[in-house]
Amino acid sequence: MSYMRIESPTTAAPIDPPPDAAALDTAAETSPGKAATEPDKMQLLQRIATLVIILVPFVGLIVAMALVWGRGFDWVNLGLLIGMYLFTGLGVTIGFHRLFTHRSFATSRAVTAMLGVMGSMAVEGPLFHWVAFHRSHHQHSDKEHDPHSPHTFGGGLWNMTRGLWRSHAGWLFKKYPSDLERYVGDLKADRLLRVVSGLFPLWVLLGLVIPTALGGLITLSWSGALLGLLWGGLVRIFFVHHVTWSINSVCHIWGSRPFDTRDQSRNNVFFGVFGFGEGWHNNHHAFPNSARHGLRWFQIDTSYLIIWCMSKLGLAWKVNVPTSQRIAAKLR
């Protein structure tokens, strides 16, 4: 298989330097009124919503397992689980990550909208929030302002455990940084992307309705619809969430580091496969604007294979992949 090579990678819009932490602390101390001392209502609602989004898929998994206990797991449920996992997971990896965050390829407006909707169905937050957090992560990877680094608590088993939790899901409960929107100024200039991001609740609902309807229509039963909701909806969300979050946590702790990236990003085989290529995380941090993360022939990268096929069909262009010389020059 031949791959496209582009010498000069495209880059996302320039990102301003982060505000000085001391200045932020001073501002918080001198702010007038009760805002500095009372819990922010929107922050409380955000934490409640986050807790619901984490717990409901887990409860759905327990209920789904209980309902198939003693009767078996049929092909309809398996098909809905795998199909929706592929559909929404690839929406995150190809759409939210490689297209919107890193501009690693270009595509049509129709495909852009479709990828934005697919990624939103994964229930990992609106498009703009997802991209902003990930761009912030790359700017501060494993440093103080990284939103989900596992390496900010120091050494020792207990601190490693704290870091693992923070990088996996704990960071979701933190207050949004005040400067978050500056990371997505380029995306906000696009009306189509503003609509996709703004309609996030609709796409979440659609991601639950589709497997529910398919389960009911295929089996011609209400029980089939319920199992479709559970396996193609909630259980699928549970697996997509934890695979995605494991890129933040596991892939910054366990794995190989063939490239000098000045952070602790690592290649992890398990998440390279089940994360559609995202688990080749050290490769990605070495070449963040590359559409291809699995840089070796044996590193399975499903997302890139799809982008490559899209390019052959005229659905993707300006596909950015580092040359072999650039890859060799950056090896440790």
Image (tube, rainbow, N blue to C red):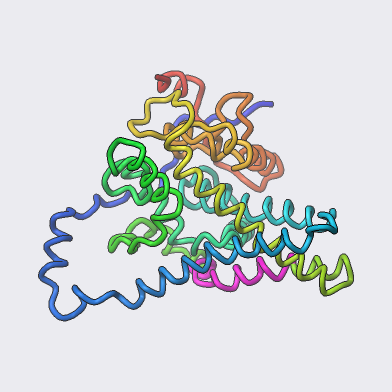
In the picture, measured across the screen, residue 221 lies left or right of residue 141, that is right
Q: Quadrant of the C terminus?
A: top left
- At 56% from the left and 52% from the top, the residue drawn is 92
Q: Quadrant of the N terminus?
A: top right
Q: Which residues are magenta?
A: 194-211
Magenta region, main secondary structure: helix
- At 54% from the left and 69% from the top, the residue drawn is 200
When the figure is inspected, residue 268 is found, relative to residue 61, above or below; the finding is above
Is residue 205 a member of the stretch shown in magenta? yes
Q: Nearer the viewer, residue 16 or 264?
A: 264
Is there any visible trace of residue 108 in the rendered image? no
Q: Quadrant of residue 293?
A: top right
- At 16% from the left and 67% from the top, the residue drawn is 28
Q: Nearer the viewer, residue 243 or 113?
A: 243
| Residue 68 x/y as whole percent | 79, 60
| Residue 199 x/y as whole percent | 54, 72
Seen as rendered, the residue at the extreme right is 220
Q: Nearer the viewer, residue 203 or 222?
A: 222
| Residue 174 x/y as whole percent | 35, 61
In the picture, measured across the screen, residue 167 lies left or right of residue 55, that is left
In the picture, measured across the screen, residue 142 lies left or right of residue 30, that is right
Q: Quadrant of residue 157?
A: top left
When the figure is inspected, residue 281 is found, relative to residue 126, above or below; the finding is above
| Residue 253 x/y as whole percent | 43, 35
